[in-house]
Image (tube, helix red, strand yellow):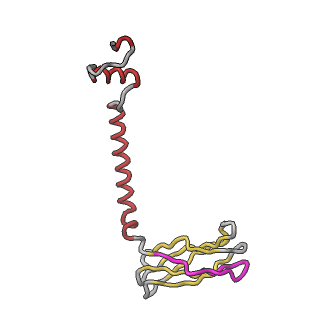
């Protein structure tokens, strides 16, 4: 009963020779030193990219853009217009530029308008805006607002 005849090694066989045979049969178990260096390099580059993005976007993510919006409601009084009622929350005395859009039943944009909101003494400003449309609209939304510099 020996390993040369193709039988399994007995309990006395050394694990070093068994590992060598397994490696010869199935290949290396771990990455090569070059692969390890490449993985470390890619991890470092990825980490630097994430840190760079966090430094660039972090203040806006943590503090917000200084302006938020909420749709209060909308109605479609005619086939060529939709009325959007919304509110903008920002610091008193600020002015925001907001993009509004009207949507058709198939979710295509059928109307677009940009409006300035503020300045106001209040921190919440409510506006009602009529958006002209190319065809009947079934919905309207605030796409986003940004604070104007010096406003």
Q: Is residue 147 left or right of residue 54?
A: right
Q: Is residue 138 above or below residue 5?
A: below
- Give the position of the N terminus as an image quadrant: top left
Which of the 4 image quarters holds residue 76? Answer: bottom right
- Give the position of the C terminus as an image quadrant: bottom left
Farthest residue in the top direction? 5
Residue 82 is one of the magenta-drawn residues? yes
Specify the principal SS of the magenta part.
strand
Farthest residue in the front direction? 1
Which of the 4 image quarters holds residue 67? Answer: bottom left
Q: Position of residue 138 (x, y in %)?
A: 67, 74
Q: Position of residue 118 (x, y in %)?
A: 48, 83
- In the foreground, 145 or 26: 26
Which of the 4 image quarters holds residue 103? Answer: bottom right
Q: Position of residue 43 (x, y in %)?
A: 35, 44
- Which residues make up the magenta segment? 68-84
- In the foreground, 20 or 62: 20
Q: Position of residue 109 (x, y in %)?
A: 65, 68
- In the foreground, 17 or 38: 17
Q: Residue at x 67, y 77 (%)?
A: 132
Q: Is residue 147 above or below residue 92?
A: above
Q: Residue at x 33, y 40 (%)?
A: 40
Q: Is residue 127 left or right of residue 139?
A: left
**Tally of marks:** 0
Q: Is residue 37 left or right of residue 146?
A: left
């Amino acid at each position: 009963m020996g390993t040369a005849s193709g039988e399994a090694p007995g309990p006395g066989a050394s694990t070093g020779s068994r590992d060598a045979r397994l490696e010869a049969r199935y290949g290396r178990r771990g990455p090569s030193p070059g692969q390890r260096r490449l993985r470390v390099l890619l991890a470092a580059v990825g980490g630097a990219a994430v840190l760079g993005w966090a430094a660039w976007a972090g203040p806006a993510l943590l503090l917000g853009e200084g302006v938020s919006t909420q749709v209060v409601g909308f109605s479609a009084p005619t086939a060529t217009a939709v009325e959007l009622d919304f509110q903008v929350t920002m610091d008193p005395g600020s002015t925001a530029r907001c993009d509004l859009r009207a949507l058709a039943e198939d979710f295509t944009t059928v109307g677009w308008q940009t409006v300035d909101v503020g300045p106001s003494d209040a921190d919440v400003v409510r506006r009602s805006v009529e958006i002209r449309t190319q065809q009947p609209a079934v919905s309207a939304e605030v796409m986003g607002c940004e604070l104007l510099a010096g406003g």
